[in-house]
Amino acid sequence: MPFGPRLDRPSAVGDEGRPRETSLGLVAATVVALALATGVAVGEATALTGLGLVAGLVTAGIALLARDSLGQKVVGHLLFLPGGTFLGLLTAVTPGNPYLVGGYALALLGTAAAWADVADDGTLEAALSQGLLSYVFGLVWLFGAGIVLAGGFLGWRLVDGVVATEDPTVAAIGFLLVLGAALGAVRLSLEGIPVVQLTPRARRDAVRARLGRCERRLALVAVAAVGVGLVSLVFTVTDSPALALVPGAPPVVEALTSTAVVGPLLAVGAVALLAAGVASATRQVTQRFGERKTRTVAAGAAGAGYLVVVLFGVVPQAAGLLVFSPLRFLAVIVLAPLALFAALGLALAAVRIDLFPERAGGPALAATGLVLAAVGADSTGLPAPLVFATVAGALVVWDAGSFGLGLTAELGHRPDTRRLELYHGVFAVGIGAVAVLGATALYAVRTTAGGGHTLAMTAAVVGTLLLGALLRG
Amino acid sequence: MRRRRVRWRGAVAAALILAVAGIWNRSAVLVLGAAIPLVFVAYGALSTVDSPDGVAVARTVDPTPAPPGRPVTVTLTATNESDRTLSDLRVVDGVPDALQVVDGSPRAGAALDPGEACTVEYTVVARRGEYEFAPPRVRLRSSGAGMVATAEPRPSGDERLVCRLDADAPPLAERGDDFVGRLTADRPGRGVQFHSTREYRRGDAADRIDWRGYAQRGELATVEYERWVSTTVVVVLDARERNRVAAGPGRPTAVERSAYAAVRTVTALMRVGHDVGLAVVGRNARGPGGLDWVDPGIGSGHRSRLTASVERAVEMDVGTPVDATHQFRKAAELSGPRAQLLLVSPLLDGRPVEAVETWGSLGRARTVLSPDVVSATTVGGRLDAVRRRARLARCQSAGARTVDWRRGTPLALALEYAFEVEARRSAATAGGGG
């Protein structure tokens, strides 16, 4: 394979031909040709096909969420939720009739889903449940990042105040708090850093004992520093000059609160926390997960990924568009995925109540999208043959797609069935072409005759067809 | 059997949606467009399919009878003998549940013109027994795929796969050129393993002249090989409970493969004139020391007794546990001091290796023939494979000749390779000596 995992499991792939490849090729060609033709008719050729890339990424995300490994799941999350949200927003903001744009978005999504074979009950449920989990983690990361930023800002102000203040008492209190925080960070990080494990086995007991003593002392000094600092806050609310009265204290305090001392102190604390975080993360990533834990960790990692995508991908774009309103932006970021989950939930319900066939959900979705697109195309005033072709395309997509997927279900992946699929596809396209030509001819007759006979003509056509079907049994 | 499938409910729904939308929008285009899905509905309803009686099916199973573990190719051909084109023919062969398809697919789909045929070819691994193939399922669909006709015609040709331990063992009366069973003695004569060189005598074959020595010294010399002699060989079949494992579902167990190797070896040894006996380790029998023991002998009747004993070893239900160490030792005792011991074991544990080492301490000539049943597609399987190779190496270091019979390699070929290696070693020795 060129790169990455194949999306269409089960994986007896790549050896002797692939049933449904030809059928789904025909489906994809039909949808893309209709989207291009419609784009040309509305004056922007690639307006609709541009949705295809995002639809494909969303489908890939859904397929990867059904996998077992951590990496694939994380990539699946990063494709599914951001991609689905983006597809929804793109569909909403693309100019044109909403039925037309939404219909083609659905058709492209259905085509991709048919290729990846993901429109079944289990896969949709997995995508929904895991997507929701990663969404919750994303919110946690978002609020967690907010809290960390706020804490960092306050800490910065404290340090800045300590370094800049003229009052030696306040400076000393600030220094004690900074010292307590730095030593506390080092003490905490010792829990995560594998010092004992990295020591030669013969010296581990000695190192473990020394480490225990070190931890106790660090904790004691940190607590003492913070405690003394907090108690000393009393001096700041009284008029007592405190340290200013102690001979020689002000220069010492001034030296201790200089940037040269506070800076390295904070750096030591930050590096210790960073090292402990990296060690813990490495330990988590390299250990063997059960299925449930893999899901949770993948969702957690993806939540962090969402934050990165939002901060470094979406925010600069939104700010660049001069439409940046923090509250509105936050509302869109938080609420838009919910619409995606609602749509996915509806699709799952449709599969469960057999509104969409489970085995051919992709072609059914694509055909539904094309029917909606036909309604939109008519509302936009596009030429009648194009509307007829879109309707016929929906039927061809359903026929060829469901035939190909049924073929795989019955014969498996290995037999070569290209000729069989082509035979069926040619018939489907032929019937569609005849139907389009017939409808166009009737429409032309109706137009030249001055109108008013449409219902009668349609009734005659429908009656003939039904009669033929009934006679044949 | 013919039945109609509901495929176009969605088309009817699409027609309704378009009609309602057309009326709502007062659009003639949509109302007219609502007829298009109905064209497909009518197409599905009007297209029919005949019964698949016009499809002739033939099956070949090659080879049958086959020995255990042998890949067997099954070919199923469906021919359109009617005068109409079959737009959608799907054939699924009735593979017995106990057999596993290891290559190809027993399913196919095709569109066939009159007189045209499609072929399904797949490979199964033979397991001991007789396996009846079910009739293939032939399914025809109408061009709109709205009607399905199914039949299970009886195919001409082979209907079963027969797998026997002595499937490809040649009759004893034929004297072939198998290398199996050729035992060498420390005397010059015909053979493959280098023994010595002597002065050239008129009439010696040109391929036995030591040409390298002639180039170095300018004197003609003739290479002598170790002479083949007839001896007594006791085949020790390791049929213990722990060897009743297979590399995967539908594959022969290690005991089946060992049994086949034993039967094949017994036949080959007898063909070159050796007396052959048999000891089955792993079952409680009425023989001496609880062994299923057959005294060394020769002839067709004797081979039948040996084969029957091997068959019993494969079929037996494991009852009470046996003391395998005792049985291995007993086999060496019963075989007599001059007999050579040929152990057939998959070497899935260390017990056979200990037996080989014990036999070595008794001064017996030993050969180990080990069928490989370990699957190397998993981490555990690879570990087992490494352990097995380590056991083979231990057998070699204990002085035994070893033959590693890998899966997918015919036994005769594995033996041929083993003897070719012996011959090359011999030639190298001859070259060095020259």
Image (spheres, coloured by chain):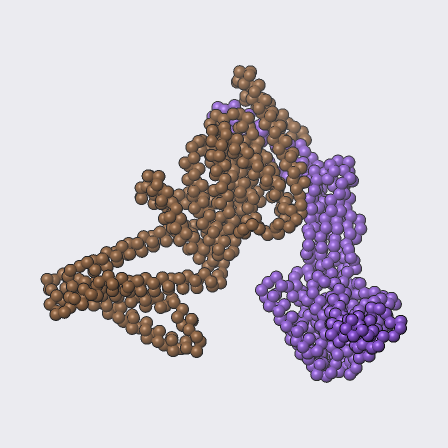
Q: Is residue B235 above or below residue B4?
A: below
Task: State whether residue A59 appears in this view.
Answer: yes
Task: State whether residue B313 appears in this view.
Answer: no
Q: Quadrant of residue A180?
A: bottom left
In the image: residue A143, left or right of residue A132: left
Q: Residue furthest right?
A: B203
Image location of residue B62, percent across then percent down? 77, 55
Q: Residue furthest front?
A: B218
Image location of residue A382, percent across then percent down? 49, 26
In the image: residue B29, left or right of residue B395: left
| Pick the front one: A55 or B403 | B403
Q: Is residue B31 above or below residue B225?
A: above
Q: Is residue A376 above or below residue A303?
A: above
Q: Residue at horizontal 61%, vertical 43%?
A: A21
Image location of residue A349, percent across then percent down? 49, 44
Q: Colour of chain A?
A: brown
In the image: residue B381, left or right of residue A205: right
Image location of residue A318, percent across then percent down? 35, 42
Q: Residue at horizontal 37%, vertical 42%?
A: A317
**Looking at the image, how many numbered discs can be counted on the residues?**
0
In the image: residue A457, left or right of residue B227: left
Q: Quadrant of residue A166?
A: bottom left
Q: Residue at horizontal 22%, vertical 57%?
A: A160
Q: Colour of chain B?
A: purple
Q: Quadrant of residue B351?
A: bottom right
Q: Residue at horizontal 71%, vertical 76%?
A: B400
Q: Quadrant of the C terminus of chain A?
A: top right
